[in-house]
Amino acid sequence: MNELCRWAEKGQAVLSANHQSKDERETRATMEQNIQSIRSKKKLLHNEALYVYEKLSKDGETKFWRCEFFGSREINCKGRIHTDLNDNVVRDKIGVHSCKTDATRVDVQRVITGVKRRACDTLEAPATIRSASLQSVATPVLASFPSVAATRLIVKRVRREINAPPPVPQDLTQLEIPFDYQRYTRTNEIFFHRFTSYSGDLAESIYRRMLGLLKQCWPTFSPESITMDFEQAMVNAVQAEFPLCTVRFCFFHLVRNLKKKIDDVHLTKRYRTEALFAQQARMITSLAFVPLNDLRNACAALEAHLPVELLPVFQWFLRNYIGQPRFDGTLTRPLFSPDCWSRPSIASCKAPLEEQKVTDVSLAKFEAGQDPPKRRKEDRVAGERILRLVQAYIPFDNAINNAPDHDYANPQNVDPYYNIIRFLSGISCNYLMDG
């Protein structure tokens, strides 16, 4: 009898454990679907990827979902899934995911969703909500969770969205206009003309026609300089319509073009996995910070320094951006002159890491009288380091003829290119080729 009781108790315990694990699984499944976007829209988790709702099918029976990175500037993922009206996946092999799955990021968004819900349901302080939400959270999630200040802003934003419109003030001392109700008037001093052109043809004739129409709309338009992408058709059109205009190219686009070339010769994997190889590749675009008088010496030094695998990329760079040496000592004419993309001056090297695009949001804020957004601290510090390197650069002739009293000078004077290689190496450590 005692033995039978023990077996019964054991069976009851096993059954209870099974029920408990089933409940936990159901709770876990419910939580996995309980993720919201920044705008408090539902996200759907499927195969470790998050999707946002796009639209209904024409028959109204199927929901179309897109990967959360579909509009990302860096990734622009094409992954999609279809679900029924109850969010059950009916088709999931649509498009190819170019984004990386990250379980930690999914858990972070799940916890942030809990923070938002708690901010709506309670009047607790942001610090209290943060502390309660992070209970029993895995360490990797803690490391990636937003800071205290960021959590405070999340709570304030959620509570501001659910608040009613502000009451009518009794007098001017009580007048407080929330940000969402603020409107600004543009004045002539800060008004900028802006034109947008859409065309599927990138021919020079199309660009010249576009610029001609622009001159008709704005007869006094006569730019002193134009910064653009490395597109020869646009360069020819600008030089034809504005002969006195100086054409300059973005360092961002120079780096992006080199990255495309590295991908063409199938070296992207080595660039992503080998730190030394990646630095040597970036030294090619770091030539943009070498003074034009030393550019030929810098190319000779870099050609001897680069690994064999990067020499085809370097020859491509010479052919298009600098010019290849002839037997008579001269250089061939490059497609894009170094005068237009070289950035050795102090003023032009302050912001080499930014994409050099003016978004609609930034322009709208500027028109409203607000200060431009601050650069990230890491970008600002990197720009300052590049600035110091450019300011401290010693010309090639001075480094050889003068006494070595500078940090970049080679004390042994064994290698005349030592200073240039060290300079390019220092520049390449301050930016990434992820454009």
Image (spheres, rainbow, N blue to C red):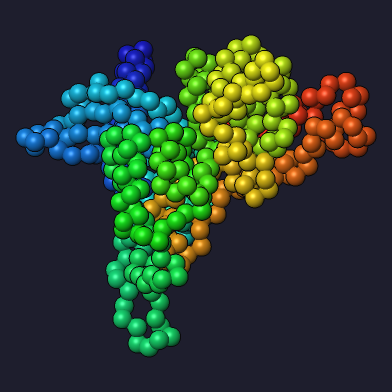
Residue furthest right in the image: 403
| Image quadrant assignment for residue 14 | top left
- Mark yes or no: residue 105 visible: no
Residue furthest left in the image: 59
The one nearer the camera, 398 or 153, is 398
Image side of residue 54 versus residue 249, left or right: left
Which residue is pictured at 50% across the width and 35% down the height?
253
Where residue 228 appears, as percent x and y from the top left, is 47, 42
| Image quadrant assignment for residue 47 | top left
Which residue is pictured at 24% across the width and 28% down the height?
81
- The relative height of residue 378 versus residue 19 in the rendered view (above or below) is below
Where residue 199 appears, as percent x and y from the top left, is 28, 39
Where residue 114 appears, as percent x and y from the top left, is 38, 46
- The relative height of residue 67 versus residue 224 in the rendered view (above or below) is above
Residue furthest front in the image: 328
Which residue is pictured at 40% across the width and 41% down the height?
237
The quarter in which the N terminus is drawn is top left
